[in-house]
Amino acid sequence: MTRTIQQLFDLTGKTALVTGGSRGLGLQMAHALGEAGAKIMLSSRKSSDLEEAAAELQAAGIDARWIAADCAQDSELARLADETLQCMGDVDILVNNAGAAWGAPAEDHPVEAWDKVMNLNVRGYFLLSQAIAKKSMIARRSGRIINVASIAGLGGNPEGMNTIAYNTSKGAVINFTRTLGAEWGKYNITVNAICPGFFPSRMTAGTLKAMGEDRLAAHAPLKRLGDDEDLKGLCLLYASDAGKHITGQWLAVDGGVSVVAGG
């Protein structure tokens, strides 16, 4: 019998691991998944931030726990996967969101900063996806992987925003998503990406101050930046059975910036 829309979006009984989940976009997505019924495991580097974020989710009636881990380190990623499975059981939904950026002109960009961005934004996504799939999703022939990319991965930047490593990493995440979605479809694992535009956050605070929130908002057809609700719907679509026939795709959540010249 065909399910209702409420049933298709229901995540009751599911478990989600959200990296970079202690604040900003990661915490917003954790709220979305938890509000739909999923149990949440949060991860980021700082225990204090995680404790505060988990308390916020718990106050909203969400079953939330946390593990501090550096997703740029291979051993930490392996530990995160193992401890999450030990604590929560099988992982149904993986949200790869932990990320870093670095601003510098391309001709002066430090190679150490390039490696830092790539290790977290690309290598980390791959290794955690691999670990969770091998230890939980493949054998069960079920899983949802959501990769947070960026509209920075779709092209160049406005003048004054020099983030070549970040843009390159997010372009890689988009093709990683396509390739993994194609390869793991046989296991009934969907892999999709979200490409946010500008959202106020700790990571974007410097850019927003330097370039001006009003100026950046003016470039968007919707004349606004993202807010603390704007990723919820797409995240839940990708994570739930409402999106079970979608894989290898990306969608920009940017107020239309990516579709207009000079955005």
Image (cartoon, rainbow, N blue to C red):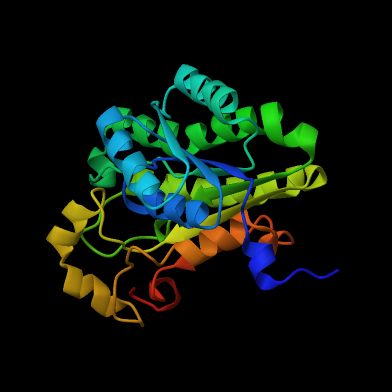
Q: Quadrant of residue 119?
A: top left
- Image check: 32 left or right of 56? right
Rendered location of residue 248, percent (x, y): 66, 55
Considering the image in quadrants, where does the C terminus appear? bottom left
Residue plotted at (52% across, 46% down): 172
Rendered location of residue 244, percent (x, y): 72, 59
Q: Quadrant of residue 101?
A: top left
Q: Is residue 156 above or below residue 94?
A: below
Residue plotted at (28% across, 65% down): 158
Considering the image in quadrants, where does the N terminus appear? bottom right
Residue occupying the far top of the picture: 75
Q: Nearer the viewer, residue 241 or 120?
A: 241
Rendered location of residue 67, percent (x, y): 42, 28
Q: Quadrant of residue 19?
A: top left
Rendered location of residue 64, percent (x, y): 44, 40
Is residue 113 in view? yes
Give the number of marks: 0
- Image check: 227 left or right of 103? right
Q: Nearer the viewer, residue 251 or 6?
A: 6
Residue occupying the far right of the picture: 1
Residue plotted at (18% across, 74% down): 214
Q: Is residue 192 above or below residue 260?
A: above
Is residue 46 in view? no
